[in-house]
Amino acid sequence: MMDLSQVFYPESVAVVGASDRNVRYYVEAMVEAGKLKVFVVNPNYKEVLGIKSYASIADIPEKVDYVVVAVPATQTPSVLLECAKKGVKAVHIFTSGFSETGTAEGRALEEKLAEIAETSGFRIIGPNCMGIYCPESGLRFANDQPSEPGPVAFISQSGGRAVNLVANARLRNVRFSKVISYGNACDLDFVDFLEYLKDDPKTNVILGYVEGFKKTNGLLELLKETCMKKPVAILKGGVSEEGARAAAFHTGSLAGSARVWEGVCRQTGVIQVEFFEDLLDLAVGFMYAKLPEGRGVAIMTNSGGSSVVYADVCAKYGLRVPEFEEETQRRLRSFIPAAGSSVKNPLDAWMAFARGRMMDALDAAASDRNIHSLIIELQPENFHVYARGIDRRGDMAETAIASCRHVVDEHGKPVFIVVNSSYYHETERAMAKFFQDAGFPVFSSLQGAVKTISKMYWYKRFKDARG
């Protein structure tokens, strides 16, 4: 088995089939990264995007480590044979038209690719996928992907979702060590990439989107071993009859039942999620907050109506919103007026913030023995009204940040920030960025924060029970 570091850290890349119109973004993106030698292979052009175009891989006068194939499906075997002669280490096949078509011809063509790779000693990512994004090496599959690396990895059978997750992560201060879109998995499968990431010192959190596993030998043990080292959150597609049918036509995958997948997650410690948004929420939670020690949550909001709904949401996801102890309520009532507020939990106490007593309110809540994590809901409308200007808005944010940091430093309890969507979009984004830059996990809805806390606590219990 070839060391997969050669897949993620090549020194040179050739894009076969690129033109000024076809998959030009691969060339543009990797040239922009400026870390790799980038070659173009297309016999119909003398140059592409100002780069000399070679007629074949064999014509490139230097070594080629990694090849992106973007030619019609029927031409891919001949390109792979050229790769074998050139001594290429890894081939990413962007082209579709293989087993996902459901035809005998498509399946046979895909099997041919796997045979060539096996006899030649290189590895294949794909076909029918976007390939590898590795900020450190300069591998990219879309324009404007960040050059700075981070601790999160994403293994995705979907190419489009890999592109979208990386783009959306920029708004959440999440950066990646590696992102893999592997499509039909005729050679390298989810298991191969997980085996590598399990021991990758540059990866602390692993996210996944999977439609079906082609390699299942040792899968359960690998998942268990990995989950004991670092959190693994997976969205499993194709757990319904309709989803399984869609998976077959997307990547040619045979999907399993929801009940079987739930059992796998319970046994191995995989964090099961329902939506792509959940994956990014969990990445934010694990990156910027410690694991909660229990189910008890304190919620600070500014609406009695919200308090009722939020308590229901917490109960739905297995968390508790316990009434504060008498001493906690006494402390809160000493500076929060009885009219128009509540000190029982959720804490309806916007006036405490507006009057500069947020530190006192959060300290009291965090001192409560039944509270293990805190959720602070911030309404951009309130910041907009009370701040009366951008400079004042920043001052208010700094006060809130100092209060939240006090809870983390003095009480060791994680704080999760919710900045609701708002008509005042500029203030909304500014508030989110203030807290993100200060190192707090920020969510756009309370439900997202609650689900994240619940799953982080479940993961802690799993590790503790097996540690």
Image: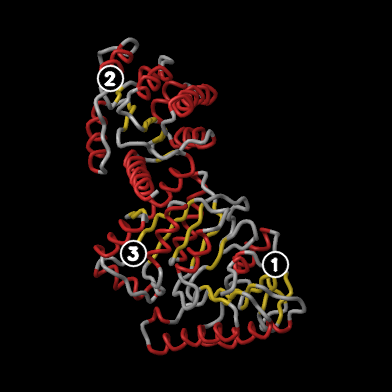
For residue 190, what is the image quadrant? bottom left
Residue density around tag 2, few if under 14, some if 14–19, many if 20 or more, within 10 Å: many
Left of 17 or right of it: where is 335? left
> Which residue of the protein is positioned furthest toward the front in this rendering?
467
Image coords of residue 131 (percent x, y): 54, 68
- Residue 111 vs 132, above or below: the answer is below
Work out whether mark 1 precedes mark 2 in sequence or the reverse, and give the earlier one: 1
Q: Amino acid at mark 2?
A: Val
- The one nearer the camera, 40 or 203, is 203
Q: Residue at x 22, y 31 (%)?
A: 308
Q: Work out whether residue 19 can be spotted.
A: no
For residue 294, what is the image quadrant? top left
Q: CA distance from mark 1 to mark 2?
A: 60 Å
Residue that numbered label 1 is attached to: 11
For residue 236, what is the image quadrant? bottom left
> Which residue of the protein is positioned furthest toward the right in this rendering?
61
Work out whether mark 1 precedes mark 3 in sequence or the reverse, and give the earlier one: 1
Residue density around tag 1, few if under 14, some if 14–19, many if 20 or more, within 10 Å: some
Residue that numbered label 2 is attached to: 343
- The one nearer the camera, 150 or 232, is 232
Image coords of residue 286 (percent x, y): 45, 44
Left of 67 or right of it: where is 285? left
Dot 1: what SS? loop
- Residue 355 vs 465, above or below: the answer is above
Residue that numbered label 3 is attached to: 237
Dot 3: what SS? loop
Q: Residue at x 56, y 82 (%)?
A: 117
- Residue 127 vs 317, above or below: the answer is below
Work out whether mark 3 precedes mark 2 in sequence or the reverse, and give the earlier one: 3
Q: Amino acid at mark 1?
A: Glu
Q: Residue at x 37, y 33 (%)?
A: 373
